Amino acid sequence: MKRHDLLIRNVLLRHQRVDVAIKGERFTAVAPAGTIAPESVHRVIEGHSFLIRPPFYNTHTHHAMTLLRGSGEDLPLMAWLQERIWPQEARLTPELVAAGTRLAIVESLHSGCVAFNDMYFHQPAILRTAIEMGVRARVGLMVMNQVSEHIENEAALEMLPDLPPTVQLSLAPHALYTTTPEQLRHVAREADRLGLPIHLHAAETRTECAIAQARFNAATPIAYLEQCGLLRPGTILAHCCHVTDEDLARMAARGVIVAHCPQSNQKLGSGIFPWVRAAKAGVAITVGTDGAASNNSLSMIAETKAAALSAKLGAASPEEVPLAQIDAAVTQIAARALGFPEAGQIAEGKAADCLLIDLNAPAFAAGNDPDADFLYAGDTSCVDTVICAGRILMQGKIVPGEAAIVAAAREAARKLRGE
Ligand SMILES: [Zn+2]
């Protein structure tokens, strides 16, 4: 008899009742309900009141900015960075970054997210925190000419040979307005040398477009990034609010992926990413929350709904961006974008990442389309259990050690304010 570690019995997968078995880091069986013998497993979760779904994979964030949440509300991007964010970030330490990252991971787990694509300082602290909490992460080696004393690229690179498969590195130049052309060309060469993907902000605001033209004599930010050699397979560009059809064709041809951040873009008034134009051009689209200082939520449920609504509004049609396209963007396409191609699907042989959603929550009473209910009417209170690479990270809506993590983050935020 085939042995499994965990059996989730009689759970709803899309519109069917199934048994889902896990061994080690993989799904070992997905079979009609009642067909996997409970005697063949070490542990059983009764799934009759749960919907099982792939989790979310957040493709753009600055996780430790949970400590800066609410700081400098209503300022424009450049003033917000220069007057509020960079002065506080000057006080960062590895311990404070770890405290903010832990808080962000707790919040992410409550919203059903198991992976984050991070761009922030004191990267060894971020890597250690991701490993300690059992989530997937890709952490950026940064290039940025502000608060650069907190960048620890060499120390992070030294950790690379010993990182578990769930945690990876990228090259993360911050944006074209905080770097030089020489630095960006160097990043392209380093990407070749180290075999690492690239992650940066791109075409976020009209100001950035004006800088691309005035400072770098480029028609658009995307054209400039191509000149610097950064458009290549696997590059993740965050935002992309201001892109021409020519930009999108370039991005599709180069295999570039968009991390669409609808709530950050709306809150900062940056612009609206043209989802339908990008999808028609063949660009891979994923969704990110951006940091909690600009969103201010890290809920991928809320972000997914915002992405769907802005895409449908942009298209002036409910039909052009069907739910299945949105759902794939935040699960399997995002998992692949972050270097986890075997994650993001509930199927035999795939990585055992999943959510158990509480079907007793009011949003699921009608039961016409439970996945739509979760994405359009759900919230963090619906997420009961989170499993990542076969490990249960949250169960019964409880993340182990949560109260201490919240208390430590409160203290860390005080220190950043200089109190
Ligand atoms: Zn960002």
Image (cartoon, rainbow, N blue to C red):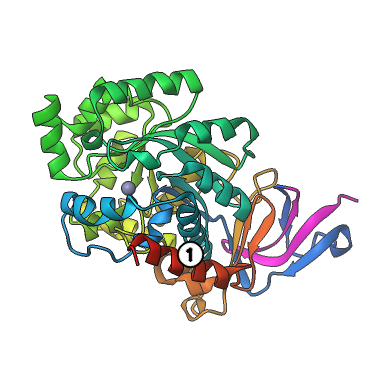
Q: Nearer the viewer, residue 268 or 346?
A: 268
Q: Position of residue 403 (x, y in %)?
A: 56, 73
Question: Where does label 1 land, which residue?
Answer: 107
Residue 145 position by quadrant: top left
**Type of amino acid at the residue the image marks with label 1:** Glu
Total of numbered circles in the picture?
Answer: 1
Taking the view exactly as shown, the residue that stands out farthest to the front is: 419
Looking at the rendered image, the quarter that the C terminus falls into is bottom left
In the rendered view, does 348 fall on the left or right side of 224? right
From where the camera sits, is residue 369 visible?
Answer: yes
Indicate yes or no whether the magenta region holds residue 311: no
The structure residue drawn at horizontal position 86% and vertical position 52%, both measured from the top left corner, is: 3
Badge 1 marks a residue whose secondary structure is: helix
The structure residue drawn at horizontal position 58% and vertical position 35%, both measured from the top left corner, is: 159
Indicate yes or no whether the magenta region holds residue 5: yes
Image height of 110 relative to 280, above or below: below
Q: Nearer the viewer, residue 315 or 185?
A: 185
From where the camera sits, is residue 317 visible?
Answer: no
Q: Nearer the viewer, residue 131 or 149?
A: 149
The structure residue drawn at horizontal position 54% and vertical position 44%, both measured from the top left corner, is: 127
Q: Position of residue 339 (x, y in %)?
A: 53, 37
Taking the view exactly as shown, the residue that stands out farthest to the left is: 214
Q: Which residues are magenta?
A: 1-24
The structure residue drawn at horizontal position 45% and vertical position 68%, both measured from the top left corner, is: 411
Q: Position of residue 259 (x, y in %)?
A: 36, 44
Image height of 39 relative to 175, above or below: below
Image height of 397 relative to 348, above or below: below
In the rendered view, does 22 fall on the left or right side of 361? right
In the rendered view, does 131 fall on the left or right side of 261? right
Q: Position of residue 38 (x, y in %)?
A: 84, 64
Q: Nearer the viewer, residue 58 or 30?
A: 58
Most common SS among magenta residues: strand
